[in-house]
Amino acid sequence: PTNRPRSHLVTLRVPGIHHVTAISGPAQQNMDFYADVLGLRTIKQTVNFDDPGTHHLYYGDRAGTPGTAMTFFPWEHAPRGGSGSGATEATGFSVPAGSLEFWGERLKGAGASPQEVDTRFDEESLRCKDPDGLIFEIVAGPATRETTAGAPVHPDIPTEFAVHAFHGVLLDVVDPDPTARLLTDIMGFEHVGEYGGRLRFRTDEHEVGSIVDLRSAGSGARVYMGRGSVHHVAFRARDDEEQQSWRETITNAGIPVTTVQDRCYFHSIYFREPGGVLFEIATDTPGFGIDESEEELGRKLQLPPWFESQREKLEAQLPRLVLPDERS
Ligand code: ZN
């Protein structure tokens, strides 16, 4: 149809967000908040492949399905991050309609200060900060989808209120136009609305984590990245072949992109979008089940084959973490 002027340019479309990676303070504090307060499942305890003396922690649904994985580099001594242009200002988690009251109480009980936000795009939400100051939103709306693996299970969180997946991210950029063009003309998103200076873009509505909101950062001062900052946002490629097409498409758009990096659980390419936010495209395959069974996910330190010979040294260096259900 000719009434969709931009879609003809798009041959590929990202299905949605794959994971969001942020910088946190102490690893145990981070785990207590995401695995206990928010009730996500710890999917993987591994190391930062570029800095193996520190953890890389993954939280998500029951299987760490792409679109549910919130991940952290705990850099205990990193200074607190700030806001500014090129920042992922907020990360949204999707919960079923009717669960905000539960979340408001639970977050208050955990010492966080959730704020109610005006209804926007027919969705109600709470805005809150994690212990490191990372801003997240709990979004309840008609579009909530559960993954095939199912929502994470926590003894104090009724399954009908559990966090299902990412809702989306909010990016702050000086000029939203070039980022908007990347999203619509190249990555397959559609501009679906605007509320209070927040431009909404959505990719496949049948997938989880399909929303990117853009907002003008105003002053233009560049974000200072530190504890409580999102480091990058990863979008999905279904397999290596699709990722290769993305690599060519993005290169052809004049944006420098890295070679493919082996992240063990997925393969990654990285590029900086025009507004300054670091984007990644990560494959759905091989997934978190590559080195431990679905039942055992996240309970023990897993290392990629190339660090296995250093296990003893790394285990001595890393803090020993206690999962919520390991506490007496
Ligand atoms: Zn990543």
Image (cartoon, rainbow, N blue to C red):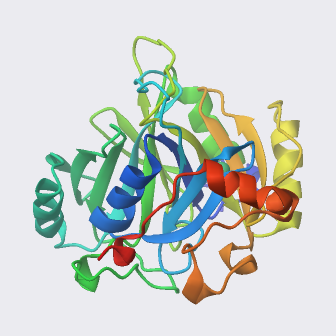
Quadrant for the N terminus, please: bottom right
* Residue 267 in the image, given as x and y percentages of width and height: 80, 59
User: Considering depth in this image, is 92 or 24 the residue closer to the camera?
Assistant: 24
Q: Residue at x 47, y 61 (%)?
A: 321
Q: Residue at x 32, y 67 (%)?
A: 36
* Residue 248 in the image, given as x and y percentages of width and height: 89, 47
Name the side, left or right, on which 82 lies relative to 254.
left
Q: How many marks?
A: 0
The answer to whether 56 is drawn above or below residue 26 in the figure is below
Quarter of image, res 105: bottom left
Name the side, left or right, on which 121 lies relative to 202.
left
Quarter of image, res 235: bottom right
The answer to whether 298 is drawn above or below residue 129 in the figure is below
User: Considering depth in this image, is 4 or 119 the residue closer to the camera?
Assistant: 119
Name the side, left or right, on which 152 lies relative to 37.
right
User: Considering depth in this image, is 200 or 260 the residue closer to the camera?
Assistant: 260
Say if residue 47 shows up in the picture.
yes
Q: Residue at x 43, y 26 (%)?
A: 81
* Residue 110 in the image, given as x and y percentages of width and height: 17, 56
Say if residue 234 shows up in the picture.
no
Q: Residue at x 70, y 73 (%)?
A: 287
User: Considering depth in this image, is 80 or 178 the residue closer to the camera?
Assistant: 80
Quadrant for the C terminus, please: bottom left
Quarter of image, res 273: top right
